[in-house]
Image (cartoon, grey):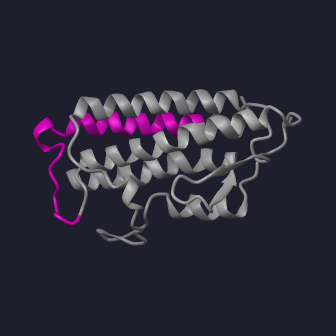
């Protein structure tokens, strides 16, 4: 597998391991509890990731199919495009000054979790989606994934290349796993 795709695959596995550790630490009765009414609970953080990753799944599959029609990529480095780099920074872990996180961005209403799903259901869906994403990363090996566009689930006018989307997803995972860890802490 191409080095850059291996990094994406490793980052997805790291997200799974980080969530498993958090799930072991947070008792079931605290899973859906908010530490602050203005902040999400651990469950809501994971539900948001599941909603986002589920929205990316068909878009990524479509882009892979398009990439299969292009000449193979070879061993050259993949490049994120301009919007991909910007969104990759925006959706990643938030920097902190002391205990204050800076750079918060409100999500679109369609990706705000509502209700509280059982812990095991959220964990199983997170795992299912990450297995699917890792499989798609593997399918992309050798394809010109920086030459095909993905429409963002957060705005139909926002487009970036597939490689950018692959880089963004684990960064977004890390952001909300960090948020969930802070809820529990």
Q: Which SS type dominates the magenta stretch?
A: helix
Is the residue 66 above or below the residue 85 in the image? above
**Residue 14 included in the magenta stretch of the image:** yes
Taking the image as shown, residue 64 lies to the left or right of residue 114, namely right
Judge by depth and name the residue closer to the eye, 67 or 31: 67
Tell me residue 168's x, y (percent). Answer: 56, 51
Judge by depth and name the residue closer to the eye, 159 or 84: 159
Residue at 27% of width from left, 49% of height from top? 44
Residue at 68% of width from left, 46% of height from top? 162
Residue at 49% of width from left, 44% of height from top? 55
Taking the image as shown, residue 173 lies to the left or right of residue 23, namely right
| Bounds of the magenta segment | 9-38
Q: Quadrant of the N terminus?
A: top right
Tell me residue 23's x, y (percent). Answer: 26, 36
Tell me residue 52's x, y (percent). Answer: 45, 47
Name the image quarter holding residue 60: top right
Whether residue 185 can be seen here: no
Taking the image as shown, residue 16 lies to the left or right of residue 134, namely left
């Amino acid at each position: 597998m191409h080095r850059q795709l291996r990094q994406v695959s490793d980052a997805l596995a790291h997200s799974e391991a980080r969530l498993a550790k958090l799930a072991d630490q947070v008792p079931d009765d605290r899973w859906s509890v908010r530490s602050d009414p203005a902040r999400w609970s651990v469950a809501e953080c994971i539900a948001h990731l599941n909603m986002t990753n589920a929205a990316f799944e068909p878009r990524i599959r479509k882009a892979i199919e398009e990439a299969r029609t292009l000449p193979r990529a070879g061993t050259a480095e993949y490049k994120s495009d301009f919007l991909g780099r910007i969104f990759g920074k925006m959706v990643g872990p938030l920097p902190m000054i002391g205990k204050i996180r800076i750079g918060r961005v409100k999500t679109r209403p369609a990706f705000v979790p509502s209700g509280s799903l059982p812990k095991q259901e959220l964990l199983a869906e997170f795992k299912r989606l990450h297995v699917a994403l890792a499989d798609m990363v593997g399918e992309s090996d050798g394809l010109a994934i920086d030459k095909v566009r993905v429409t963002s689930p957060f705005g139909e006018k926002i487009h970036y290349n597939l490689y950018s989307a692959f880089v963004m997803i684990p960064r977004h995972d890390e952001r909300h796993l960090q948020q969930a860890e802070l809820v529990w802490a």
